[in-house]
């Protein structure tokens, strides 16, 4: 089982971030741009301010957060039970439930369901699972055109871009860039860059498609076990169009998205909108079960997608990753995401949650650099509406990656491993450390510049000083100073120097 | 394929959780009942009129609202709203009480209209199941007086009657009033997007105007 498309180019984070942070687009990073960085910072600051204001309005926020965490944790502990309950109830209401162990199976199921309808065009609602299984490319290979209907996804699709955020996928685009794109792709040279005009252009462009297209594909925010229901949270109404007008609807959803009860939405319909877009409630939430008579599609399919999720349940410490409800509050608050934007994570799931989810979806066999893409400041944990302790999981995964590397011959002989092992050897024993410090004090002399910093290191160590200076070791180490001022000899003159504050030379 | 996959996924989950796949947790119900729901005791807005709060929140999210003194005043209020907006008669959801409607207007029944006809009517008139003050939301459930989901989606103008007895303070108080199996739509203001530079823009694909008539009953 290999979820082959979650991690796009198999690019390490530091390398990808360096390209994204370059001032000009390059062949490797066509979207990297200082404009992009401004857009990302601007958008995340706006969402964060709105989120903080509407969260502060609810004195019971921490109770909601605790309940949300408890409901999601409980569901994961009984995941098979709730999936079976969902399946039974969805089927009772006329829906068809399918199970896909990996991305290839999910794509195959979609093609099989579509085959008798032979659609030329298919409406799409923003769905990360579709992105995860590479569905659009697959549909096009089979002669069908997937039409993204969420405004941001439409911008991404028309610009042949990639989403950089899973709530606001085009947040790296400014209105001017969107205007130019729409003017070209919709043949509307007169279009202004007013957001209202751009939204109206999307309305005109898609309206007839909504009224006439017979098949739609969606993701889902929640599955409800006790009613067999599906809940989709959105703003524009494109979701409602796709959920109610076509004859056939296919919903592709990760197995972890189930909730025990319809009533549990009373928690998540409060925490998700406030965390995701800083609204007390987003404009539209749709909830339905199966094929409800004349109100909606005649044929409804749910594809339950595993694709690397079930093994994550086995690890008690990182299982909490699957509580995620995809609000993206952790992206908006993350100082690393602010700098690099989403593309540097090179994954469908960017930001702090992506840094822990992506490598785990690949059984830690890919994206191993992502758990290091964090300063461990903890802001992501603070804002998480289901209290995923992301820093804890990041450290846990770093440990797993190191163990994994040490278990191979090449890894155990790597410079990094030898250096860490040597450091452990030196630090285990005072006299060894003492000798090492003295050696280093002597060895550094030719490298220390007049300001007391080392600005250049040779060989492998050069990586460190390329982007920052290293303070030189002081002439007298703390241990030497302690011995000089506190040892039996120097205790004769204790008042000469009060050693209450260690001195740094 | 899907049967094999079903068994494989269920086995993988059970194995990961360290149990036998046939023992799909009879303990789930007991453990679910123990989840703390302290948020339900919160009542932040107890000192305010929930009617005032609802109206304020509707306005904040670009919806219009008119207070109506009694149900008997509804026909006049509907006629006045349509006149002020220079709108011809909207379609009406089946099950909307006859006595709400102004005399002498021929309201087309939404049920009889195709999607293309719905695209051409000037609006839609419905009731709702429950409304939530704190979030400025109205909740519609498929059926009596609330139409099918497409009826409140395709027309560009949605006129919704909310009785004060349908208004609750918070999201958790709304849930006991809903029938879980029915197609349900929470509507909070007109269709909107924030996809362009995080500016909330009114009106993308759903109705660009939402007008609530809040009736004391």
Image (tube, coloured by chain):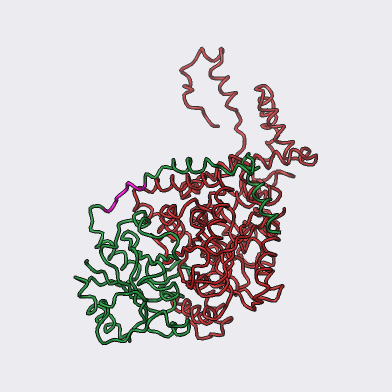
Chain colours: A red, B green
Which of the two residues, A433 or A218, is positioned nearer the viewer here? A218
Q: Position of residue A264 (x, y in %)?
A: 44, 52
Residue A460 falls inside the magenta stretch: no
Asked whether residue A349 appears in the rendered view, the answer is: yes
Q: What is the span of residues highlighted in magenta in the rendered image?
A: B39-45
Count how many numbered circles sit on residues in the image: 0
Asked whether residue A35 appears in the rendered view, the answer is: no
Q: Return the residue found at the far front.
A: A92
Q: Return the residue found at the far right.
A: A409
| Residue plotted at (53% across, 47% down) | A75
Which of the two residues, B33 or A486, is positioned nearer the viewer here? B33
Q: Position of residue A200 (x, y in %)?
A: 46, 79
In the rendered image of this protein, does residue A29 appear above or below residue B170? below
Q: Position of residue B54 (x, y in %)?
A: 29, 63
> Is residue A271 shown left or right of residue B213?
right
Which of the two residues, A22 or A54, is positioned nearer the viewer here? A54
| Residue plotted at (76% across, 41% down) | A411
Q: Quadrant of residue B186?
A: bottom left
Q: Quadrant of residue A164?
A: bottom right
Which of the two residues, A117 or A65, is positioned nearer the viewer here? A117
């Amino acid at each position: 089982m290999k979820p082959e498309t979650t991690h796009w180019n198999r690019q390490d984070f530091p390398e990808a971030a360096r390209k994204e942070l370059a001032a000009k687009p390059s062949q490797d990073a066509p979207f990297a741009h200082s404009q992009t960085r401004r857009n990302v910072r601007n958008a995340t600051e706006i969402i964060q301010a709105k989120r903080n204001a509407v969260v502060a309005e609810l004195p019971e926020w921490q109770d909601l957060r605790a309940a949300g965490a408890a409901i999601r944790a409980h569901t994961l502990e009984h995941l098979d039970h709730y999936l079976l309950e969902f399946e039974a109830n969805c089927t009772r209401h006329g829906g068809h439930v399918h199970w896909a162990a990996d991305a290839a199976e999910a794509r195959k199921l979609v093609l099989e369901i579509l085959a008798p309808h032979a659609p030329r065009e298919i409406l799409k609602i923003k769905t990360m699972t579709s992105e995860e299984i590479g569905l659009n490319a697959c549909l096009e290979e089979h002669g069908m055109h997937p039409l993204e209907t969420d405004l941001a996804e439409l911008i991404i699709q028309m610009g042949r871009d990639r989403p950089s955020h899973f709530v606001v996928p085009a947040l790296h685009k400014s209105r001017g860039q969107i205007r130019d794109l729409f003017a070209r792709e919709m043949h509307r040279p007169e279009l202004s860059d007013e957001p209202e005009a751009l939204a109206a252009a999307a309305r005109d462009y898609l309206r007839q498609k909504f009224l006439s297209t017979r098949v739609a594909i969606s993701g889902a925010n929640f599955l409800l076990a006790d009613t067999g229901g599906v809940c989709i949270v959105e703003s524009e109404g494109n979701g409602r169009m796709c959920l109610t007008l076509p004859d056939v609807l296919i919903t592709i959803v990760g197995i972890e998205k189930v909730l025990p009860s319809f009533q549990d939405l009373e928690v998540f319909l409060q925490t998700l909108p406030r965390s995701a877009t800083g609204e007390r409630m987003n404009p539209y939430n749709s909830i339905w079960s199966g094929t409800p008579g004349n109100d909606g599609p005649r044929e409804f399919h749910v594809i339950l997608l595993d694709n690397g999720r079930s093994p994550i349940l086995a690890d008690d410490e990182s299982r909490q990753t699957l509580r995620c409800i995809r609000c993206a509050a952790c992206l908006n608050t993350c100082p690393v995401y602010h700098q690099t934007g989403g593309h540097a994570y090179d994954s469908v799931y960017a930001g702090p949650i992506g840094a822990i989810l992506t490598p785990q979806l690949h059984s830690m066999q890919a994206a191993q650099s992502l758990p290091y893409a964090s300063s461990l400041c903890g802001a992501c944990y603070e804002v998480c509406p289901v209290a995923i302790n992301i820093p804890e999981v990041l450290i846990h995964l770093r440990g797993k990656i190191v163990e994994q590397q040490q278990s191979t011959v090449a890894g155990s002989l790597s410079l990094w491993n030898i250096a860490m092992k040597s450091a452990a050897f030196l630090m285990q024993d005072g006299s060894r450390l003492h000798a090492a410090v003295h050696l280093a004090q002597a060895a550094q002399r030719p490298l220390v510049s007049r300001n007391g910093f080392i600005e250049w290191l040779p060989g492998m160590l050069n990586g460190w000083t390329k982007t920052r200076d290293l303070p030189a070791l002081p002439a007298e180490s703390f241990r030497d100073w302690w011995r000089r001022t506190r040892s039996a000899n120097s205790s004769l003159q204790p008042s000469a120097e009060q050693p209450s504050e260690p001195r740094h030379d | 394929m899907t049967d094999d996959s079903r068994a494989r996924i269920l086995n993988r989950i059970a194995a990961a959780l360290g149990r036998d796949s046939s023992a799909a947790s009879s303990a789930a119900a007991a453990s679910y009942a123990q989840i703390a729901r302290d948020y339900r005791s919160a009542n932040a807005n107890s000192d305010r009129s929930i009617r005032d709060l609802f109206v304020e929140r509707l306005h904040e999210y670009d919806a219009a609202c008119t207070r109506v003194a009694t149900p008997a005043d509804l026909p006049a209020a509907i006629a006045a709203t349509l006149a002020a907006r220079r709108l011809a008669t909207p379609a009406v959801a089946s099950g909307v009480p006859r006595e709400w409607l102004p005399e002498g207007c021929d309201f087309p029944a939404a049920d009889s209209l195709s999607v293309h006809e719905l695209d051409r009517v000037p609006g839609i008139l419905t009731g709702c199941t429950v409304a939530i003050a704190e979030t400025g939301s109205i909740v519609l459930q498929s059926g009596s007086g609330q139409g099918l989901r497409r009826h409140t989606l395709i027309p560009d103008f949605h006129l919704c009657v909310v009785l004060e007895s349908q208004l609750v303070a918070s999201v958790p108080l709304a849930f006991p009033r809903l029938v879980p199996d029915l197609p349900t739509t929470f509507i909070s203001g007109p269709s909107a997007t924030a996809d362009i530079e995080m500016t909330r823009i009114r009106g993308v694909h759903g109705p660009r105007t939402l007008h609530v008539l809040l009736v004391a009953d």
